Amino acid sequence: MAKNTLLLLAVLTAGCAGAHDDPSVLTRNDAIDDYIQVSELKEIDAIRSRDQLNHRAVTEKYIIISDRKHEYLAAFARRCKELTNYEIKPDIRREANVLSARFDTYRGCPIRSLYEISEGQAQEVMQIGEALGQSAHE
């Protein structure tokens, strides 16, 4: 009886451990990773802008940042659940008017990489998230 109880406890614990990552979010993140590679997006070190930066959440790991003239895809080093909960402004820490990959954060979430994208590419990335599940805003 004790062996059965321990076995059941181990199975339940393993099931709960895997429940933290929503498969649809993981699929969307993988699809965006593939899009970055296939489209050969140009990785940049920083966004330099005197305009206010706005963002749209694609998933908990990706956002699209925009100013009046340009669009950028930002990838976080980890999942960032804070994106959809608050009005977010970048935590610019090194230089005014510069948002840097690997140094700056959005709501405490470290930015792993930045990619320069066109308006059409931004729409495609948003559609990837919507086609594979609910958008990060919902």
Image (tube, rainbow, N blue to C red):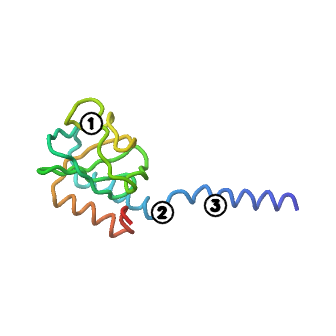
Q: Quadrant of residue 119?
A: bottom left
Q: Amino acid at mark 1?
A: Ser
Residue under the point 26% across and 50% down: 73
How far apart are labels 3 and 2 at the CA level? 14 Å
Q: Is residue 98 left or right of residue 77?
A: left
Q: Secondary structure at mark 3?
A: helix
- Residue picked out by circle 2: 23
Residue with the most extreme right position = 1
Marking on residue 15: 3
Marking on residue 100: 1
* Residue 48 drawn at (x, y percent): 17, 38
Badge 3 or badge 2: first in the primary sequence = 3
Q: Is residue 74 above or below residue 27?
A: above
Q: Quadrant of residue 99?
A: top left
* Residue 8 drawn at (x, y percent): 76, 62
Residue under the point 22% across and 63% down: 123
Q: Secondary structure at mark 1?
A: strand
* Residue 134 drawn at (x, y percent): 38, 68
How far apart are labels 2 and 1 at the CA level? 30 Å
Q: Is residue 92 above or below residue 24?
A: above
Badge 1 or badge 3: first in the primary sequence = 3
* Residue 50 drawn at (x, y percent): 14, 40
Say few, some or many: other residues with alpha carbon within 10 Å of mark 1 (under 14 / 14 to 19 / 20 or more): many
Mark 1 vs mark 3, foreground winner is: 1
Residue under the point 43% across and 46% down: 78
Residue with the most extreme left position = 69
Residue with the most extreme top position = 94
Q: Amino acid at mark 3?
A: Gly
